[in-house]
Structures are given as C-alpha cells and as structure tokens.
Image (tube, grey):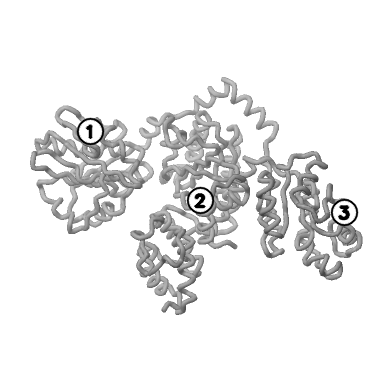
C-alpha cells in the first residue's frame, strides 16, 4: 500500500518530468466538494495507467456557473473529459425531494453536452438506494458519451471508513484518504478505458513471474508455481485476451516446465506466441505483435525485472508496461487494477442514440431541457444581509481578513486590534452575510473604506469568501458600499487591486464595475454619475428589517 | 526520541512538500516552504495521520503551522518518542 505522502512525492515527480510516453488527457472536475485533494492520487494512478492527467478543478459548488456560462473556466480549458462529482445532499435544499437533485443534474448534463465534445463521467451516489442510482444511470444513458462513475460501489462497502468528518469540516472534502485513493484508482482506470483502446495481448516473463525462482539456477524442481496468478491469467484468456511469452531462458528447459511440472496451470497452447531466447526483449515484443498481426500498442507487458520494464518503456512507449509489485501475492490485484484490458461498454443502442443527437432533432430535445444561468440564479433566491462591523462580529471578520486569498483585492492582513480603528463612525466598514435556498453561508464578506485627506473614499479592503463567488454577490456588496458613501456625501470611490499568486479571480473587479484606471493598481469611480446596480435576482435585507 | 521518529516525520514532510529532508527544521513553516499552501496543508494532515496511525482533531489540524508545532501536536495526539 502506497502512503498518501508517497503519492504526493510521486505526483510531484510525474508533474515535473516531461514524460513522452504518457498520453495527455485534459480533465475538468466539477464538484460539490473540494475534489482538488484527489489530485496527487489521480496524477499518480493516471501515470501508472499511461495517462498524463492535466487538471482543471472548478471552484467547488459552482456546477451551474461553470456549465451554463459559455465563457466559464470549464469551457476555456477545453477539456477532453469532464468529471461531474455531486453529493446527493448538496443538490437539494432541506425538505426537497431527492428527485429534484436528479432533475437538476440532468439539465446540467444536457447543457454540458451541447457545449463540449468532452466525454462526461458522472459520479453516482454512495448511500443512495439502488433504484435511485439505477434511475441516474438511465438518465446518463440518454446523453451521448456520458458514463456513470460507480462511486457507490467503491464507498458503500467501506461504510463509515469512507468518511472523515474532520476533512469535511476543514475543507469540504467528505472522504478519508483511503476512500480518496480508491476513488482515484478506479477513476484513473475508467479514464484509461476512455482514452486508450484495450490491450489485446499480455506478454509475460517466466522466472519470478509465472513461477518463483530462476529456472537456469534452481532447476525445475527448485521453482514454485504462482498458481493464483496463473489461474487469473487463464481466466483472462477465457475473456479473449491473448497471452504470449517473452523470456530470457533456454527454450528447451522452459518448455519442459510446461509439459512436465505437475503444478503448472497454464499449458503451452494457452500462449499465442513465444519468444524464448537471450536477445533483446523489445525485439521480442515487436516479433510477437507481428506474428499476431496486431499493433505493438495493443501489447501489455508483465515482467518482474524493473530493468526490462524501463527498457521497454524507453524503446516502445506505446506498450502498456504493468508496474509489477515486488510481492507475487499482489500480482493479480495490480494486473487487474491496471485496467489494461478494460473497455467502456458501448452498446449498439448507445451508438444509434449518439447519431440521433448529432442531428438537429436531438439538439432540439436538449434545448427544451436547457435552463439559462439567469434562470438558475433567479431560482437560487440569494439574499445578502449587510451589517456594520462591530465587536460582535469582529472575530469572524478578523478570521476572514487573514485567510481569504482568492477574492481579495489587497490581501491586507490585520489583527483584531488593528481593525478597531475601522469601527469608528468616520469609516464605512461593512460585513456581508449571504443566504440562498440551499442554506446560510454565514458572514462571508468584508469591506473597509476610509476617507482620504482629499475627501475621497478609499477601499482599503474588499474580500469575499470563495464559497459565494460566481453569483455577482460582489456586485451587490460594492453597490451597498457605494450607497453608504453616497449617504455621507462622498463622490469619488477609489480602490486598489494588488495582485498576488492567488487573487486572480478579483483581477477585473474594478474594471468590470466601470472604475477608471489611474495607475497600474489604483482605480476610481464617480459614484454620483455611476450607479452600481444590484442584480435583480439578489435580495437585500438590512439589519433592522 | 528517538531520531527514528523525527526521521519519519521529516521523510513524510519531505514527500508532501517536495523538499529534501535536510532542508527541514523546527522553524520550517508556510512562510519558509513555498509549496505549503492551504491545499497542501490538508494533504499533509492526511499524510501524517496515515504515517503515524493517529486521528487529529480539526483544531489540531489547523494549528500545525510549523514543524515545531507539528511535533508538539503529534506528541499530544499520542505519538511517542519525540526528543
């Protein structure tokens, strides 16, 4: 078992090397939880299966904002694959029927299908009834190139072992490390099946692979047959996967084991081709492919020698080289998990339906189901509740000021004591609470404005927690601030955008609200001439309402 | 403690943050390690829990803001052998 730390080191290493052999797959992840934490596991498990996964993780809980907006980060990323990972409880508000959640997702899938050619993998729902997941599978089946990711099959058997309340509280990541790793393994496997056609032939070594020991040294009495592994290989062959041998051995001695050894499961005629000699294994693999009349990219290679594996990787990057573990007891598991022979099941019916959707008629069906982003936001019933910053909320305000990185115009940090001057009446200091039909986000915005010597009003701090981004809450907040300043007979509102490594989401904030740029970081707006409109789908409720 | 336990801690952190273990000290923190951001911090929590077979509380997880603090909190969480 690889530890989480080792996964992180591995992922770093994979990302840093320009690895020619791996197939690049641009993968966008939309989720109602912080899926970003899966990244190291997915990168490592992807690489083990021949994939270089390039990720775009959308900010969590922005399914509509990403899918319904044609200019969203999702579409700009131009993904090969979109992963939609929603928890059922995040899809509906309290008391609502879970079926509404399915409807919501169905609309999203239909919309995404219109906007992108990417394959779509949609998580099903751990803890849900079989009927519910079956209904979801049926919905996914009606949408071309869309596949269910069977998350329930992974997590349900784990029971409570799959869930970590601490990670949920800290980071909105519901799953334990063990569960995350299992998800990453299966997802990498499914992505491989999507991107890479299944291998047709498994090329096997003999010594320390089909048996324990070295035939040339120990003799046929001194070797121990790996029966479980051979049984598994035999079953693979039943499934139509060809087997072949590539071994550095004396052929006559090796063949004798097949005909004589009492414990051998596989017989010589189970192998469709063999290359047993002392020459280069890359040549052996080419010869096998030629003999079987398949491409070398249809070969998987299983050899206990790390040197041989590296050699094949360097000479034939198209070959699927299995990461053979040191312990023979793990051969079956690792070969199975490699997904080398997996194929995404596509029925004839699916194919026909895909053709239908490509025609105009199909597009019309999708359009009828479509919901615009405006409709969605309208239905969200967003309410913003401004309140003065005071001793009552100072603790939470201090916390936000010191930990908000993304939507933070100046990233100016203050201690609680340093914030006290902003509580004076000559400043405009507002905090913002936000609610919608899914719940109360609590206090998520802070704005501190002070009057300058020349009588202008200067935004010292403007920040919003990333939990409420993508709904124009920031516009409503700025409008409320401008109104406060106007009531104090202020005319010019100025602000600074100070770029950091993390606050790109706030980059165009002043520009988008028609401020004029004075110098590289300063922006000004005459609020007696420009009114900042609050979007009509956002309701404002004041403290004393 | 043993040096062995410290070595285990440093090896784990070295893997999480992508820096050689020799460059780590009690003073290492998000200010000194560029890779130590909020996402990596969470990955670190998970990595430490797996390495030392412990379960941290949310408070402990949030307070681990330097290697020195990590050592103190690991002891508090029942990891023995820290010198």
Residue that lies at the very extreme toward the front in this rendered image: A279
Look at mark 1 in the image and give the residue it sits on: A517
| Cβ atoms at labels 2 and 3 below 8 Å apart | no
- Residue A36 in the image, given as x and y percentages of width and height: 46, 49
Query: Label 2 neighbourhood size at 10 Å, few (<14), some (14-19), many (20+)?
Result: few
Image x and y of residue A176, in percent:
50, 58
Name the subunit of mark 2: A
- Residues A95 and A435: in front is A435
Q: Which element type, helix, strand or loop, lies under badge 1?
A: strand
Identity of the residue drawn at 73% across and 56% down: A303
**Mark 1 or mark 2: whose residue is earlier in sequence:** 2
Q: Residue furthest top?
A: A360
Q: Is residue B62 left or right of residue A510?
A: right
Label 2: state its secondary structure: helix
Chain bearing tag 1 is A
For disc 1, the neighbor class at 10 Å (few under 14, some 14 to 19, many from 20) is some
* Lower position in the chain sequence, tag 3 or tag 1: 3
Picture disc at residue A457: none
Q: Which residue corresponds to the image point at 36% horizontal and 46% vertical from the top-left?
A: A467
The percent coordinates of residue A309 (x first, y second) are 69, 54
Q: Quickly name the residue at label 2.
A: A16
Q: To which quarter of the image does residue A91 belong?
A: top left
Which one is in front in this view, the residue at disc 1 or the one at disc 2?
2
Q: Nearer the viewer, residue A107 or A489?
A: A489
Residue A268 numbered tag: 3
The residue lying toward the viewer, choosing from B70 and A142, is B70
| Sequence-first disc among 2 and 3 | 2
Q: Is A337 displayed left or right of A216 in the figure? A: left
Which of the 4 quarters of the picture holds residue A534? top left
């Amino acid at each position: 078992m690889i530890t989480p730390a080792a996964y992180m080191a591995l992922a770093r290493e994979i990302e840093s090397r320009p690895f020619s052999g791996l197939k690049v797959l641009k993968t966008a992840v939309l989720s109602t939880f912080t899926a970003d934490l899966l990244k190291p596991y997915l990168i490592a498990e992807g690489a083990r299966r021949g994939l270089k996964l390039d990720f775009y993780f959308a900010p969590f809980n922005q399914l509509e904002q990403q899918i319904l907006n044609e200019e969203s980060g999702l579409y700009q990323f131009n993904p090969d694959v979109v992963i939609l990972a929603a928890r059922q409880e995040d899809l509906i508000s309290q008391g609502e029927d879970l079926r509404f959640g399915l409807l919501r997702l169905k609309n999203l899938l239909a919309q995404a299908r219109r906007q992108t050619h990417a394959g779509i993998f949609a998580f099903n729902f751990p803890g849900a009834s079989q009927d519910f997941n079956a209904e979801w599978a049926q919905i996914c089946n009606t949408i071309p190139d869309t596949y269910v990711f069977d998350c329930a099959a992974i997590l349900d058997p784990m029971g409570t072992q799959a869930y970590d309340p601490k990670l949920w509280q800290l980071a909105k990541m519901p799953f334990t490390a063990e569960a995350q790793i299992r998800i990453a393994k299966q997802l990498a496997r499914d992505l491989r099946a999507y991107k890479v056609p299944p291998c047709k032939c498994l090329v096997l070594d003999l010594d320390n692979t089909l048996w324990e020991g070295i035939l040339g040294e120990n003799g046929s009495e001194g070797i121990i047959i790996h029966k479980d592994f051979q049984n598994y290989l035999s079953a693979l062959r039943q499934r139509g996967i060809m087997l072949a041998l590539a071994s550095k051995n004396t052929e006559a001695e090796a063949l004798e084991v097949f005909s004589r050894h009492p414990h051998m499961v596989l017989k010589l005629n189970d192998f469709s081709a063999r290359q047993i000699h002392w020459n280069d294994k890359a040549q052996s693999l080419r010869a096998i492919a030629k003999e079987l009349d398949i491409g070398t990219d249809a070969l998987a290679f299983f050899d206990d020698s790390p040197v041989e594996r590296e050699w094949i990787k360097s000479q034939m990057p198209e070959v699927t080289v299995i990461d053979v573990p040191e312990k023979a007891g793990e051969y079956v598991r690792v070969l199975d998990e490699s997904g080398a022979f997996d194929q995404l099941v596509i029925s004839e019916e699916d194919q026909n339906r895909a053709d239908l959707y490509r025609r105009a008629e199909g597009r019309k069906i999708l359009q009828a189901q479509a919901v615009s982003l405006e409709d969605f936001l309208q239905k969200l019933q967003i309410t913003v509740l401004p309140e003065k910053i005071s001793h009552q909320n100072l603790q939470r305000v201090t916390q936000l000021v010191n930990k908000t990185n993304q939507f933070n115009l100046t990233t100016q940090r203050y201690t609680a004591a340093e914030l006290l001057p902003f509580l004076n009446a000559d400043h405009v200091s507002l905090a913002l609470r936000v609610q919608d039909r899914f719940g109360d986000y609590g206090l998520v915005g802070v704005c501190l404005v002070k009057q300058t010597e020349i009588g202008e009003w200067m935004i010292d701090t403007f920040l919003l927690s990333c939990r409420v981004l993508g709904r124009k809450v920031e516009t409503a907040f700025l409008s409320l601030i401008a109104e406060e300043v106007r009531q104090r007979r202020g005319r010019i509102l100025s602000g600074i955008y100070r770029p950091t490594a993390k606050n790109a989401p706030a980059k165009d904030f002043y520009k988008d609200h028609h401020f004029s740029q004075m110098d590289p970081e300063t922006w000004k707006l005459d609020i007696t001439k420009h009114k900042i409109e609050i979007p009509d789908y956002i309701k404002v409720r004041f403290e004393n309402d | 403690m043993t040096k062995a336990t410290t070595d285990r801690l440093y090896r784990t952190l070295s893997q999480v943050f992508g820096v050689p273990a020799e460059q780590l000290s009690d003073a290492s923190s998000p200010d000194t390690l560029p890779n130590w951001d909020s996402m990596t911090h969470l990955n670190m929590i998970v990595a430490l829990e797996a390495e030392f077979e412990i379960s941290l509380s949310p408070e402990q997880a949030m307070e681990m803001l330097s290697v020195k603090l990590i050592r103190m909190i690991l002891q508090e969480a029942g990891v023995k052998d820290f010198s």
